[in-house]
């Protein structure tokens, strides 16, 4: 059974809420056991399942702080959602291999998410505006 737009929004917002709370367990619970997790450009390439995604989220939550996600727009299809958002917060660690030095940071994100019938993500593909990050975190 296909999810409604409201159900997809609720699941995406739940996922973002766990990210904003630095809740690794919560984020991983939004993924199916065989989920493809793909942060485009990541040295690991796509990973499979919540445990495959764990390392990315643990590093992300150590490298970024006080993150807030503002949705710009969403596009919908049957069982998928495309979300354009802006992340804003601080970079106390080494986000994406760059010295953050606790500087403020804001960048665009594009998520392409496919949902399973139970509402969990069976594919999460994330595109990060690395050019904006490089401009804000000169090395």
Image: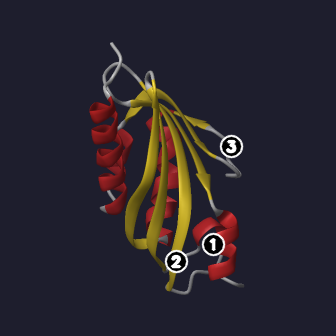
Say what secondary structure mark 2 lies in.
Answer: strand
Where is 134 relative to 81, above or below?
Answer: below
Residue 122 coordinates in the image, percent (x, y): 46, 28
Give me the C-alpha separation between circle 2 and circle 3.
24 Å
Residue under pointer 2? 105
What residue sits 66% from the left and 48% below the top? 40
What residue sits 50% from the left and 71% below the top? 63
What residue sits 55% from the left and 87% below the top? 101
Residue 91 coordinates in the image, percent (x, y): 51, 78
Residue 34 coordinates in the image, percent (x, y): 48, 25
| Image mark for residue 133 | 1
Give the side of residue 52 with respect to residue 19, left or right.
right
Give me the C-alpha separation between circle 3 and circle 1.
20 Å
Residue 130 coordinates in the image, percent (x, y): 67, 64
Q: Are marks 2 and 1 in contact (CB under 8 Å)?
A: yes
Where is 19 relative to 54, above or below?
Answer: below
- Sort mark 3 into few (<14), some (14-19) or many (20+) by Cα contacts within 10 Å: few
Say what secondary structure mark 1 lies in.
Answer: helix
Residue under pointer 3? 45
Point out the image quarter for the C terminus: bottom right
Q: Are marks 2 and 3 in contact (CB under 8 Å)?
A: no
Observer-nearest of 58 and 16: 16
Give me the C-alpha separation between circle 2 and circle 1.
7 Å
Say what secondary structure mark 3 lies in.
Answer: loop
The mark that comes first in sequence, 2 or 3, is 3
């Amino acid at each position: 059974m296909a999810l409604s737009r409201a159900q997809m929004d609720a699941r995406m917002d739940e996922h973002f809420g766990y990210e904003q709370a630095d809740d690794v367990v919560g984020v991983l619970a939004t993924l199916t056991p065989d989920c493809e997790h793909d942060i485009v450009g990541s040295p690991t390439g796509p990973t499979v399942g919540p445990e495959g995604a764990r390392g990315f989220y643990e590093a992300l939550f150590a490298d970024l702080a006080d993150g807030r996600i503002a949705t710009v727009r969403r596009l919908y299809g049957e069982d998928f959602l495309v979300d354009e958002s802006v992340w804003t917060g601080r970079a106390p660690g080494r986000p994406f291999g760059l010295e953050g030095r606790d500087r403020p940071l804001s960048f665009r994100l594009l998520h392409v998410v496919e949902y399973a019938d139970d509402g969990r993500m069976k594919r999460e593909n994330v595109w990060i505006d690395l050019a904006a990050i490089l401009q804000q975190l000169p090395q």
